[in-house]
Image (tube, grey):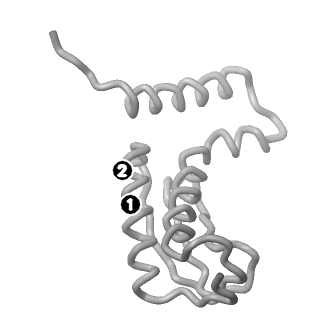
Amino acid sequence: MLKNYTTTKVDFELFKKECEKWIEVFGLKGWSVVYCHDEKECDNYAEVWYNLKARCATITLIKKWGNLFTGKDFQIKQSAFHEARELFYARINLLAKARYVTEYEIDEEIHNLIRNDENLIFKCEVT
């Protein structure tokens, strides 16, 4: 088990590659995404910040990690997946936290997520 690991430039490149893979898989083409490798002190391996209106996001790999309980590359790949999935759920997250939200807005976003899943799972077959 590794302890108090510090991520490297090579780790950051793997993280970006994995994020881009999952952004492609999840169809998040409506976002402008930048990546950071940050020294900030926090309990996360990575994090995402987004501006839903501007459709801009920053996905950050944290440099200083605490203990690792799995392999380093596995944790980097899983963290990339996690942050891409958070971006996928950005709108529903905003709606769930809004003081005033309409039933229409919730239904609209749920159908957006379902359509996204349909396009991921089912291939269009022209007969």
x 54%, y 86%: residue: 7
What is the secondary structure assignment of the residue under circle 1?
helix
x 43%, y 88%: residue: 9
What is the secondary structure assignment of the residue under circle 2?
helix
Query: In 3D space, how far apart are the residues under numbered discs 1 and 2 (Cα atoms)?
Result: 6 Å
Q: Nearer the viewer, residue 47 or 101?
A: 47
Is 85 rendered above or below residue 38?
above
Percent x, y of residue 31: 44, 53
Residue 104 lies left or right of residue 35; in this view the side is right
| Tag 1: amino acid | Glu
Please tell me how crowded label 2 is: few (under 14), some (14-19), or many (20+) other residues with Cα within 10 Å.
few
Is 11 rendered above or below residue 49?
below
Quadrant of the image occupied by residue 40? bottom right
x 17%, y 15%: residue: 126
The image quadrant where one finds the N terminus is bottom right
Percent x, y of residue 121: 39, 29
Is 27 rendered above or below residue 76?
above
Q: Nearer the viewer, residue 52 or 123?
A: 123
Extreme residue toward the top, this view: 127
| Tag 2: amino acid | Glu
Extreme residue toward the right, this view: 99
Residue 96 numbered tag? none
Percent x, y of residue 49: 61, 64
**Residue position for label 2:** 24
Label pair 1/2, CB-CB below 8 angstroms: yes
Please tell me how crowded label 1 is: few (under 14), some (14-19), or many (20+) other residues with Cα within 10 Å.
some
Residue 61 lies left or right of residue 124; in this view the side is right
Q: Nearer the viewer, residue 107 or 17?
A: 17
**Residue position for label 1:** 20
Percent x, y of residue 82: 58, 57
